[in-house]
Image: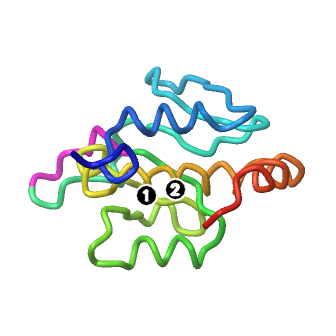
Amino acid sequence: MPDKKSRPARVEDVHELALAMPHTTVERGSGDNPVYQVGGKSFIFFRNPRPDAVDPDTGERYPDVIVFWVGSEADKQAMVQDEGSPFFTTPHFDGHLSVLLRAGRIGELSRQEVAEVVQEAWLSRASARRAATWLEEHPLE
């Protein structure tokens, strides 16, 4: 049986991992969707269905989009331009340092991969002091 880190990721992992980051609070969006914040800044949020993220075959709005902040435009492009990646973006997010992931595709990632994305999202939004403290305690591999 695969260990917890290498098993396929689940949506519950996003919630668990986000809440495990220090100083994280949870706000609720307009559809009661969770918005994870650090220092009043969102780093992950579960999005309501929107007209910019739709199924190309049916035109139906995706009901399961998760938004993760990223550290830089280069990070974003690396994630969304990889053909094998489940991450994507839409024109609505041009110039926004974030990537989108459908919850229905999260199993294409390992729990460890999702942990890294959550940690990077938190680091991109935490204060410099909080980020430095966390990195001292959790050196990135």
- The residue range painted magenta reads 58-65
Could you tell me the amino acid type at mark 2? Val
Q: Position of residue 40 (x, y in %)?
A: 76, 35
Q: Position of residue 14 (x, y in %)?
A: 45, 39
135 in relation to 14, above or below: below
Q: Which residue is mark 1?
A: 113
Furthest residue toward left: 57
Report the predominant secondary structure element of the magenta stretch: loop
96 in relation to 43, above or below: below
Q: Which residue is mark 2?
A: 117
User: From the image, which quarter does the C terminus lie in?
Assistant: bottom right
Q: Are marks 2 and 1 in contact (CB under 8 Å)?
A: yes
Q: Nearer the viewer's eye, disc 2 or disc 1?
A: 1
| Kind of element beneath mark 1 | helix
Other-residue count near label 1 (Cα within 10 Å), few / some / many at <14 / 14–19 / ≥20: some
**Res. 47 image quadrant:** top left
Q: Position of residue 64 (x, y in %)?
A: 31, 40
Residue at 46% from the left image edge and 27% from the top image edge: 33
